[in-house]
Amino acid sequence: MFIVTVGLNHKSAPVEIRERLNFPEHTQPEALSKLSSYPAVKGCVILSTCNRTEVYAVTTDVDAGITAVKNFLGRHCGITEGQIYEYLYVHTLYEAVRHLFRVSAGLDSMVLGETQILGQVADAYRIASENNVTNKVINAFFQNAISVGKRVRTETGIDRMAVSISYAAVELAKQIFGTLENRSVLVLGAGEMSELTTRHLVANGVSKVTVANRSFDRAVNLAEQFGGAAIPFEGVFGAMCGTDIVVTATGARNFIINPEQMNQVMTNCSGRTVFLIDISVPRNINPAVREIPGVRLYDIDDLQVVVDRNLAEREAAAVECERIIDEEMDAFLKWHNSLFVIPTVVALKEKGNSIKEAELERALSRMGSLTDKQKKVISSMASSIVNQLLHDPITNLKEYASTHQGHLYTEILQNLFDLEVEGQAVRRRPSQDEVSYQSGVSSQESGVRMRS
């Protein structure tokens, strides 16, 4: 069986197309049922996130499988195959395996090394498994991919360095306080950046959230998400003394915190350190506030330095991730190729023996009376001819089984000898893309040469 991937992501399609080709979790059981009803699809998983929608399918015929998946996607989003084709990418065979391994590792994400995608891959596989649309190949494929995702994060730490402004703020706060357990935060502003930063802070231990905003209702809505409290915007300076971290992310065009106000706050705080994070553009806090004793101020440029440094570290870690993926690919390919080789060898031997028995019976019936010894000599000779004829193809096929070309040689042998192999009964001529890909791979193979 062959693995194919058909999908689109943030690099191949605009958001208006991604929105239409989306499968929320509650819709996936029905979608998987429809997809698995296509005769060419023998097993499938749908991975659908805000930045990607991908169908992973196992098929006995690559071309038919790809056509089925494209037809399914076109019907789902109401876009004809011709219209949607420009947004879709297709990966077949081992490129499909490498693609999912890289997705699970966070190497194909909008944010390099992001963690969330691994859970999304695991959830997609769980839903497909619960709806009985997977098979042996899909199961091994996704279980390996999830293991790869865990391994690269454990061994490289690619997801431990903050590469977003909101999370960089959390990293700086942890550097200041050591731990954020039982710390408090005062958030000025109730927009997306305020919510995201607060979410990260709470996830890292902050236990008390206070929100202030020009629109009090919006402050209440944000505070309720985190079990916090809202205060009038005029009360922010009075609240600072009882707060460890102050985050500003408002749409104000001028400074809303100036030195004279912070001097008064620090007088009231009796030597307490106040940690200010200004993630607004334009800035909300006058940079002169930095000169006040006890005030630690970081603005978006400070946070960007952290992001840039961590992004460089993630890019370095990504190189090691690719090496790990290469290792895991080799192990998976050997297993997958064995699925093709062993049944094919059995089918080839059975066909050889079937032809031998039929021709032996026909020959003996024409030769008249023969002694048992003579019949045994003729039968032994026929068996020897078949065994010697099949020896080289079988030996070579087993040798190629551990290479990237294993499945291709197996399929060619099936075609040449017209073999019927269970689960691989649909034979086809390899596509030009496969031939080109395999040609490129063969130039890199070592110790394996075509025998003329």
Image (cartoon, rainbow, N blue to C red):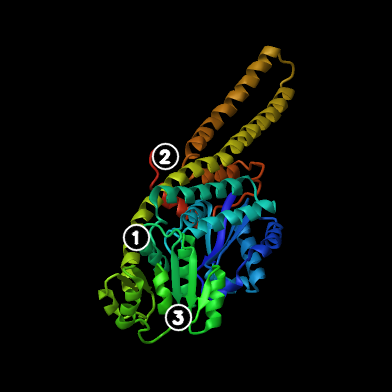
The residue wearing badge 1 is: 175
The x, y position of residue 245, in whole percent, is 40, 69
The residue wearing badge 3 is: 235
Quadrant location, the C terminus: top left
The x, y position of residue 79, in whole percent, is 63, 74
The residue wearing badge 2 is: 448
Q: CA distance from mark 3 to mark 1?
A: 28 Å
Is 135 situated left or right of 6 in this image? right
Q: Residues within 10 Å of mark 1 (few under 14, many from 20)?
A: few
Name the residue: 51% across, 37% down: 397
- Who is closer to the viewer here, 375 or 279? 279
Is 316 situated left or right of 181 in this image? left
Considering every residue shown, the one lying at the far bottom of the view is 253
**Image disc number at residue 43:** none
Is 390 situated left or right of 169 in this image? right
- Who is closer to the viewer here, 365 or 289? 289
Circle nearer the N terminus (1, 2):
1
- Who is closer to the viewer here, 193 or 96? 193
